[in-house]
Amino acid sequence: MIIKIISFLLFLFLYSSIYCAEIISDEEYYNKGINLYKNAEFDEAFVIFFNLAQKGERDSQFNITNMYEGGVGTTQNFVEALKWCWLCALGGEKKCFKKIEKLLTKIDDESLVKISKEVEAFLEKKLYEKSDINYSLMLGFWYEKFSPEQNIEKAYMWYSVAVTGGLYKAMKNRNNTGESLLPETLIDLQNKASKIYSEIKYFGNTKDE
C-alpha cells in the first residue's frame, strides 16, 4: 500500500514538473511568434498572435490587424482587421489609430454594424471575466469616440463605472459627456452604472454561468 502511494506521489511530481516546464510567459510566447514570422512560418505565427490578442496584448492585436489586412498567415479579411485595429487603438496604441480610417473605406455598412457589436461584446466579456475596470474605460472611449453609432449615454455610463472602480482619469470624460444629458437621464445612468459595478466586483467571474 505504501509503495503504491509513493508511486502515485512520484507520478504527480513528475507530471507537475513536465507541465510547469511547458508553461511559458506571454512575453516568451510573443517572441516565439516573432521568430516564426521572421522565418516565414506565418500561419503558426498568426495562431500565437491571435491567442495573445484575445488576452488583450496590444502588439499582438496590431500584428493580426496587419496579417488580416494583408492576408498573411490567414485569409485576407478587412472586417476582422478593423475589429482588432479598433481594440488595439482602444488600448491606447497610437500606431493602431492610423489604420482605422483606411480600413473603414474598405467595409460596407452592414459589416460595419456587425463588427461593431462584436467589439462591444468582446470588451464587456473581458470586463466581467477579468473584473478589470480598464475595460469599462475602453467601453466609454468606444461609445464616445470610436463607435460608428456614437452613444453619449452609454459613454457616460461606462465612464462612471470606471471612476467608481478607481480610474479617476476617466472623471473628466464622464463629466464632459454628462453635460449634454438631462438630469433624469443622468440619474438613470448613474443607477445603471452602480448596478454594473456591483456585478463586476462581486459576481464578475460568475456572470452568465
Image (tube, rainbow, N blue to C red):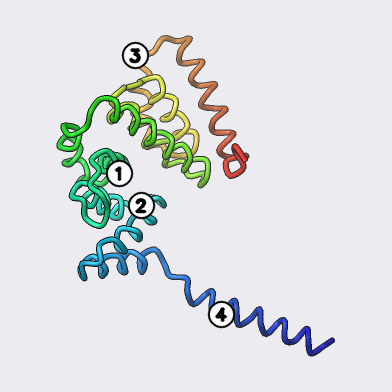
Closer to the chain start, of discs 4 and 3, is: 4
Where residue 60 sits: x, y (%)?
30, 55
Mark 4 Cα-neighbour bin, 10 Å: few <14, some 14–19, many ≥20: few
* In the image: residue 29, left or right of residue 62: right
Query: Would you say the residues marked 1 and 2 are in contact, meaning their CB atoms lie under 8 Å apart?
Result: yes
Q: Amino acid at mark 2?
A: Ala
Could you say whether the residue bearing mark 4 is in a helix, strand or loop?
helix
| Residue beneath disc 3 | 180
Asked where in the image residue 199 lies, by quadrant, the reply is top right
| Residue beneath disc 2 | 53
Closer to the chain start, of discs 1 and 2, is: 2
Is the residue 149 above or below the residue 47 in the image?
A: above
In the drawing, what numbered circle is on residue 131?
none
Where residue 123 sits: x, y (%)?
42, 39
Q: CA distance from mark 2 to mark 4?
A: 28 Å
In the drawing, what numbered circle is on residue 84?
1
Could you say whether the residue bearing mark 3 is in a helix, strand or loop?
loop
Closer to the chain start, of discs 3 and 2, is: 2
Closer to the chain start, of discs 3 and 1, is: 1
Q: Amino acid at mark 1?
A: Trp
Could you say whether the residue bearing mark 2 is in a helix, strand or loop?
helix
Name the front one of labels 3 and 2: 2
Q: Amino acid at mark 3?
A: Ser
| Residue beneath disc 4 | 17
